[in-house]
Amino acid sequence: MNPKSKWLIALMTMLALTACGNVDDEDDDDSSDDTDTTEETTDDDSDDSTTTTTGNLPDYDSFSLSVDAAVVDEALNTDGITATFTVQVADRFNEAVDDDTVVYFWAENGYLQENTCSTSSGSCSVTWVSGGTRPEDGLATVLAYTVGEDSFYDSGTVNGIYNVAGDVVDDGQDGLALNEAIMSAPEAYKDYNFDGYDNSSFTDSATGLTFSEDAFFDYNDNGEYEASSSLYRGENCSAAASTAGHCTETSIYIWDHTQIVWGPTYGSPNTAVSADYTTDFDAVTDVTDWNVGDTIYVLVSDYNGNTPVAGTSIAVSGDDDDDEDFTVSYSSESVPTLGVAYNLPYVFSLTLTDAFETGGTAEITVTYLGSDYSLYVDY
């Protein structure tokens, strides 16, 4: 039975029941939508059929993962330090998915107190804990994924249905429709080095182990990693889109991942001053003279070369600790709490805005894990 026939039969039945007085207020209350989809009926002018759009399946561009602090202070040297990972999950209409939608997690190292969570109002969280063998590079990837669908962008009339060029969609101008743009989700994978999917042999910088390729979640069981799909994979296709091969896969894994740093409890930071902006300690350029209007850059990392812990700060003083010799504009005076961390330093920028005397030396003090470290620049 096609959807139009089902809709006509339902309508005729409702009219008959109403005429007979058999539909009372209590029945109306009981007939409220209690399912896990939101439905609306849209006429598809291209084939004179009726297509039903369903929402509340998570879609790719409405899924995100965050962490309360990407540099987990003291985790490298202490067991039991925690971080909270939270997902936000919405559907194609950018509405929160149904409560109790299950999201799965994987951590490269450390461990998760729970490897799933169930959404409430479109969100849920899990707790990561430091423990076990420490990664050699002080980094960990955390992945979150769930069953969902590709995203697409309506053109012409917004109808929540994936359309192709065979459909007539009134865009208010020429009445034509091209294939609507798809945001295709790559298959989820365990990104050990946080450098994108690697299908050739590589060495994991966290463990020193060699892998033949990144492990991936083969949702469609075809034995191959798929970075994208030219076909829309989801529930809601027009008749023409279905004929063209779209919606043959009605669901996929959608996912997001992030990287954290196991913050050390002790140890000196790596520091440097550069005349030019860089995040590479090997590419630092010497500061010969710091003149008014010039900006210099201070690089700070932990001893693994990773982003330093939040609260790592910087200050500048003149000769004999006198900060009245000049004024300095800071990009920031301390490292903020970050949502993702890398095997890169944090870079402060310092601009000399005024100098009341010349020929002096400025002391740049980096405060890291409670200790001060000094760098010097002539101005």
Image (tube, grey):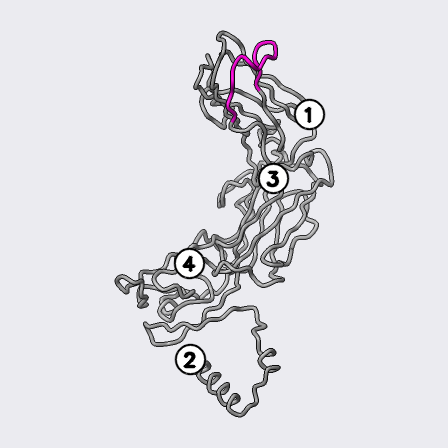
Image location (x, y in percent) of residue 60: 49, 55
Residue type at the position of mark 1: Gly
Structural distance between the alpha carbons of marks 1 and 4: 50 Å
Q: Name the residue under label 2.
A: 4
Decide which of 358, 297 is in the foreground and name it. 358
Q: In this view, does 318 lie above or below 89?
A: above
Disc 4 from disc 2: Cα separation: 25 Å
Q: Give the range drawn in magenta.
A: 316-330
* Point 65% across, 46% down: residue: 84
Residue named by callout 4:
152
Mark number displayed over residue 370: 1
Does residue 69 belong to the magenta stretch? no
**Crowd class of label 3 (few under 14; some 14 to 19; many from 20; radius 10 Å):** many
- Dot 4 amino acid type: Phe
Asked which quadrant contains residue 308, the reply is: top right
Name the residue tied to disc 3. 70
Q: How many labels does the image show?
A: 4
Local crowd size for mark 2, using a 10 Å CA cut-off: few (<14), some (14–19), many (≥20): some
Q: What amino acid type is highlighted by mark number 3?
A: Ala
Which badge, 4 or 2, is on the more N-terminal residue?
2
Q: Distance between the residues labelled 3 and 2?
A: 52 Å
Label 1 packing within 10 angstroms: few (<14), some (14-19), many (20+) = few
Give the mark nearer the N terminus: 1 vs 4: 4
Q: What's the amino acid at mark 2?
A: Lys
**Earlier-in-chain disc, 4 versus 3:** 3
Residue at 33% in and 74% down: 47
358 or 277, which is in the foreground? Answer: 358
- Residue 66 location in percent, x, y? 58, 46
